[in-house]
Image: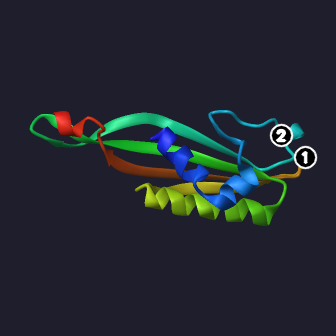
Amino acid sequence: MLDEIYQAMMADDFIVENAGGRIKYYEYPEAADLQEPHIVIDPLAPPSPEDFADNNWLKDDHLYQIEVWTKKRTLTDMLAKKIQSIMWKLGLAQVGGLPEYDKDYGIFRDARRYTGKKYRKDFDTL
């Protein structure tokens, strides 16, 4: 799922134009060095089994946090909304989030959490 999220972001022209090359898994930028927008994809838990039938789980429940860091509030908002739309198309809905401003470094951060169930990749072989 992590690669699917990354690939969906890389397929969006607006995201690539503004944060291409700075979309990372788990890696947070150094606030003091931040000049360009960054996006961080962070799984908050491993996929958990959901929706059972015939002694098998059918779906994995995913929980991700995706953060947008920029020096411009409006760009942070636009990128976060693009990501929200991408995540919806991938079947993950926003379940919370927190926008904040770090006045020491002049950085706007938008951290949104997304959850959703996806059929197992090996579902056809059960």
Q: Are marks 2 and 1 in contact (CB under 8 Å)?
A: yes
Label 1: which secondary element = loop
How many discs appear?
Answer: 2
Q: Nearer the viewer, residue 57 or 103?
A: 57
Left or right of 33, for residue 90: left
- Mark 2 belongs to which amino acid? Ala
Residue position marked by numbered label 1 in the rendering: 104
> What residue is at 39 percent from the left and 51 percent from the top?
116
The vertical placement of 98 against 5, above or below, is: below
Label 2: which secondary element = helix
- Mark 1 belongs to which amino acid? Asp
Which of the 4 image quarters holds residue 108? bottom right
Residue position marked by numbered label 2 in the rendering: 31
Residue 92 percent across, percent down from the top left: 44, 54
Structural crowding at the residue carrying mark 2, measured as other residues with C-alpha within 10 Å and reported as few (<14), some (14–19) or many (≥20): some
Q: Earlier in the sequence, mark 2 or mark 1?
A: 2
Q: Where, quadrant-wise, is the N terminus in this rendering?
A: top left
Q: Nearer the viewer, residue 43 or 103?
A: 43
Residue 101 percent across, percent down from the top left: 80, 54
Answer yes or no: is residue 2 visible: yes
Left or right of 55, for residue 84: right
